Amino acid sequence: MSDYAIGYFIPFHRFEIHAGMDPTESCARLQTLTASKWPWFGSPRDKEFIGKVSQNAFRLLRIIKGRNTYNPWILGKCTSASSGGSRVSGVMTLHPIAAVVMVVFFVVAVQPSMSPPQGRWIPAALLSIFHLAMCAFAFVPEVKRNEHRLRELLAAG
């Protein structure tokens, strides 16, 4: 199951991965590559994600070089699959703080366009176009990389 959507200005992507190991083992594999917090300087060595992993759920942000507000937040859970192994399902979306900032910027841009004179809609239109472009060129490629890497990590075993 794979879909991309932009609902209420917030991009998201649902994913589902079938792993050959039990749910606890799937989450444990993610845990070995996850740092619990950013170090003061640099990036965590030998880790691919920052976040929290419990016995059957995870909340991750992939470590990337540089900055990207559209780097997806990965929220998921590991459950038993009826065919054996585990089913890892979840959603990739913007970090909640980034999402709030996007909505606030959009509301600030739309506010002046609701009153005369003509042409005040231009900032809102430009902001919308910029946001859609960033979703296409920053969010979607990162989602694809994240899902591919998760599939690699959970398939090996």
Image (tube, rainbow, N blue to C red):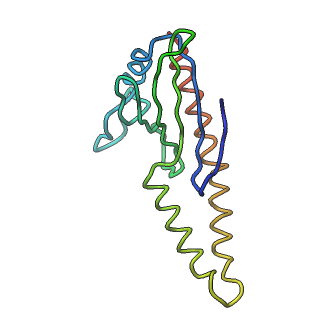
Q: Residue furthest right?
A: 118
Q: In screen coordinates, is 154 left or right of 118?
A: left
Task: Give me the residue at 41% from left, 36% from top.
Answer: 59
Q: Residue furthest front?
A: 82
Task: Give me the residue at 62% from left, 52% from top.
Answer: 7
Which of 64/125 is in front? 125
Q: Quadrant of residue 140?
A: top right
Q: In screen coordinates, is 57 left or right of 9?
A: left
Task: Give me the residue at 52% from left, 63% from top.
Answer: 103
Image position, residue 137 (x, y; %): 65, 49
Q: Residue furthest bottom?
A: 117
Image position, residue 58 (x, y; %): 41, 31
Image position, residue 104 (x, y; %): 49, 67
Image position, residue 105 (x, y; %): 52, 68
Q: Quadrant of the N terminus?
A: top right
Residue 30 vertical placement versus 11 (above, below) = above
Task: Give me the residue at 59% from left, 57% from top.
Answer: 8
Q: In screen coordinates, is 140 left or right of 24?
A: right
Q: Disc count in the image?
A: 0
Q: Quadrant of residue 50?
A: top left
